[in-house]
Amino acid sequence: MNVPSRPASPSEPVSAEGVVAAGAYVDGRRIANIAVSEASSWRAKPGHVVWIGLHEPDMALLGAVQKQFDLHELAIEDANHAHQRPKIEQYGEALFIVARTAQLIEGRIAFGETHIFVGEGYLVSVRHGASTSYTPVRERCESCPRALARGEDYILYAILDFIVDNYSPVLESIHEEVEEIEDNVLAHAITRAQIERLYMLRRDLLRLRNAIGPLVEVCRRLEHDELSMVRATMQPLFRDVTDHVRNIQERIDSMREVLAFAFEASLLVGQAQETAVSKKLASWLAILAVPTALAGIYGMNFKNMPELQWEYGYPVLLGVMAVSCIALYWRFRRVGWL
């Protein structure tokens, strides 16, 4: 699946090299804005943590980052191609994590990816496609130095929690549309455009569920596995992210069920309306069949026909037509066909 590219918003200070921000931290406080080429020297200092954020970097920038932190070649290749499922892989003492991001663009869910490299004294995030800037994450962490002082695994938690939180606005927008469809489906016959929209919503929700489903396993490993980069005190926070992802999955499943019900209900309403129309047409055809049959019989102009010379034949025949039509109309009205 190709991940659509998204230009950086004006609020994101992305340089020509794709570096959003790069800073060195001590005890949860930023002490310097650094260049990528200086990252390894800052990281080597005791108690220092380097946090670098990249947005759609080219291979040259990824190569520079790889050199600074001695990142694995396969992880760099994955970060460059941005066609990965959510996953977590360990390369020596470093972790490589992939998470899918989502945004609602023109009524459709657009997907992006975030690749995270985390190791002793550093964290590098790489964004591709549709995603929100992680500047609010950095600002929130910097506003609470005590929390940020926990280290790179806390930054990892903050980013993953932010990614999962950003699924909620997408679901809220879709939920409002789903509720509107649910309210109107029994009141009006569904149109072709509405059927297409129902299908697109169900497909987008399925794609979203498939995109975030593997994230449960990523958080589970961060929560339970003996990973060198995740301290035991951080595991409850990753458990909270896991619970949040599962809650998102349940909401997606619930909305998909509502859309399926809306689609089935719309078909039933359409069939009921067609049946009602068919009953009305059949009723009127039956009513009209009586005078048509009698008029047809006595309009054949044969010489020797019964009652052809009868003085009261014409009014009697009209009376029979009227009584028959009224009787049929009353009967059809009684059974609800008219």
Image (spheres, rainbow, N blue to C red):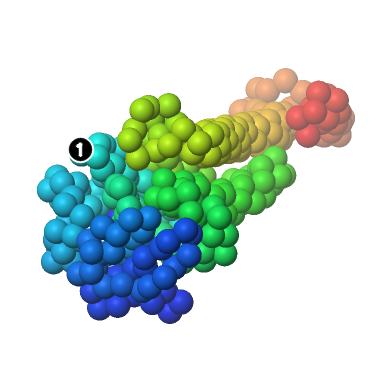
**Where residue 229 appears, x then y in whole percent?**
35, 40
Q: Extreme top residue here? A: 306
* 100 is higher (above) or lower (below) than 329: below
Can you tell which quarter of the image residue 243 is in? Answer: top right
Residue 38 vs residue 65, the one in the foreground: 38
Residue 272 vs residue 321, the one in the foreground: 272
- Which residue is under mark 1? 92
**Where residue 305 appears, x then y in whole percent?**
68, 23
* 25 is higher (above) or lower (below) than 276: below
Can you tell which quarter of the image residue 298 is in? Answer: top right
In the displayed structure image, the side of residue 7 where residue 323 appears, left or right: right
Label 1: element kind: loop
* 324 is higher (above) or lower (below) than 80: above
Residue 192 vs residue 230, the one in the foreground: 230
Which residue does the image show at 15% across and 46% down from the upper left? 72
Q: Name the residue type under label 1.
A: Gly
| Residue 22 makes an appearance in the image | yes
Quadrant in which the C terminus is drawn: top right
